[in-house]
Image: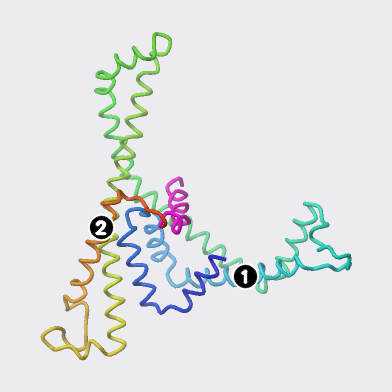
Amino acid sequence: WVGKKLYAIYQILPTNIINMIFGVGLCFFGGVFFMVFAAVEAAKALGGVDLYNNLRIVYEEGSLVAEASLEDDKADLDKDGTADVEQMSTNELINHKAFVAMKAVKDPMRLQAAMVSLGNIWLAVIATLKFQFAKTVAVALGIADMLSLPAVRIAGPFMAGLLGPDLNHWVHVIIDTTIKFVAVFVASMIQSVISAFYSGLRGGKLFADGIFNIFTDRGWMDKLPDCITSKPFDPNTSYLDEIIAYPVAAVGFYYQLQNGFALDFPLNLILFPCTAMEWVLRWQ
């Protein structure tokens, strides 16, 4: 249901409005969802126009399957007052629904090509993210290795006293593992700050470009004095877009720092799908 509503909104909104919304999201949540936004940027770069076409194909065919399944749930061919699907066993229901889904798909070859293409893009995105963030983790683990021995020398006797003679052989492992967890956590926070700063600049630029594209399409930029902007308006030779982009980026970056890269209520509920996707990408 949520996917249908979002797709309907996507079809209605102009491209410039979508870019502005995405830009604001980058500014205010780029550090919170740095893996999600990095994945989106990588998917756009790797998939290009085909990405949107393949997503549209999968959505259209999936909608046909969903509609056919809903109609099938109402079917009562034996006229006994009970839906047929409610009288089937689990195995019969699985086989029946598979038949309904396969029958509903209009162009299996097109769906297969789209699914294969999306799968390839997904693998490429995961590989890109792993390469991009593996350097941060590698540096964190290297620092942890250098800190491990001094930490054992300092905290080892105290830990050995707490664990007792039967468990003191675990002292080095516990301290080393703790340092590694802390180092990776700190590296993740540093990466969040870096990503928030970059995504703020990127999002502010998208937001400003969307605004001035709308103004240009409506002819408002041509009405401005020549001392403010040249005619026709070119963002590459004007500072007007930067005047809007940088303050928006600064506000978004400051907001994320103030909140410690956490989401307040009700944003944590509204953006829960993004949070789930963020943790899936981090785990992978």
Q: Quick one: SS at disc 2?
A: helix
Give the vertical position of 72 relative to 137 (above or below): below
Residue 62 drawn at (x, y percent): 62, 67
108 vs 169, left or right, is right
Give the vertical position of 264 relative to 208 (above or below): above
Q: Main secondary structure of the magenta part?
A: helix
Residue bearing the label numbered 2: 253
Q: Say which amino acid is labelled 1.
A: Ser
What sort of colour scheme is used for the picture?
A: rainbow
Of the numbered discs in the image, which one, if any, rests on residue 63? 1
Cβ atoms at labels 2 and 1 below 8 Å apart: no
Question: Is-magenta flag for residue 280?
Answer: yes
Between 282 and 133, the residue placed more toward the observer is 282
Between 96 and 77, the residue placed more toward the observer is 77
Dot 2 crowding, Cα within 10 Å, few <14, some 14–19, many 20+: many
| Magenta residues, start to end | 267-284
